[in-house]
Amino acid sequence: MVKKKFPEIEQRLFKNVYVCMRCNAKLRTNLKKIATGKVKCRRCGYKFLRLKNKDIKV
């Protein structure tokens, strides 16, 4: 059975959360900084990030 999450919880977990494509470190920043290339991974220095997936694990 899949639980329905509150919108406040989903916003806190997934809004502006990005994951490094190389080392899977999580970063919280906005899209504008990522698009201009100002943000890099704290752990490895890689510049390519992706959004955190919102898949529901059953």
Image (tube, helix red, strand yellow):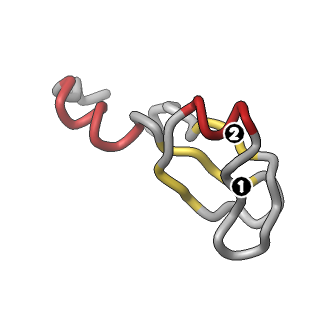
Which labelled disc corresponds to residue 20? Answer: 1
Corner quadrant of residue 43: bottom right
x and y, in percent, of residue 22 in the image? 83, 60
Residue at the spot 22% in from the left edge and 24% down from the top edge: 4
Q: Earlier in the sequence, mark 1 or mark 2?
A: 1
Q: Is residue 15 above or below residue 23?
A: above
Circles 1, 2 touching at the beta carbon (< 8 Å): no
Quadrant of the rendering where the C terminus is positioned? top left
Residue at the spot 31% in from the left edge and 27% down from the top edge: 2
x and y, in percent, of residue 47 in the image? 80, 53
The kind of secondary structure element at disc 1 is strand
x and y, in percent, of residue 14 in the image? 41, 37
Furthest residue toward bottom: 43
Q: Residues within 10 Å of mark 2 (few under 14, many from 20)?
A: some
Q: Is residue 48 above or below residue 35?
A: below
Residue nearer the viewer, 57 or 29: 29
Identify the residue position indicated by label 2 in the image: 50
Residue nearer the viewer, 48 or 25: 48
The kind of secondary structure element at disc 2 is strand
Amino acid at circle 1: Cys
x and y, in percent, of residue 19 in the image? 63, 51
Q: How many marks?
A: 2
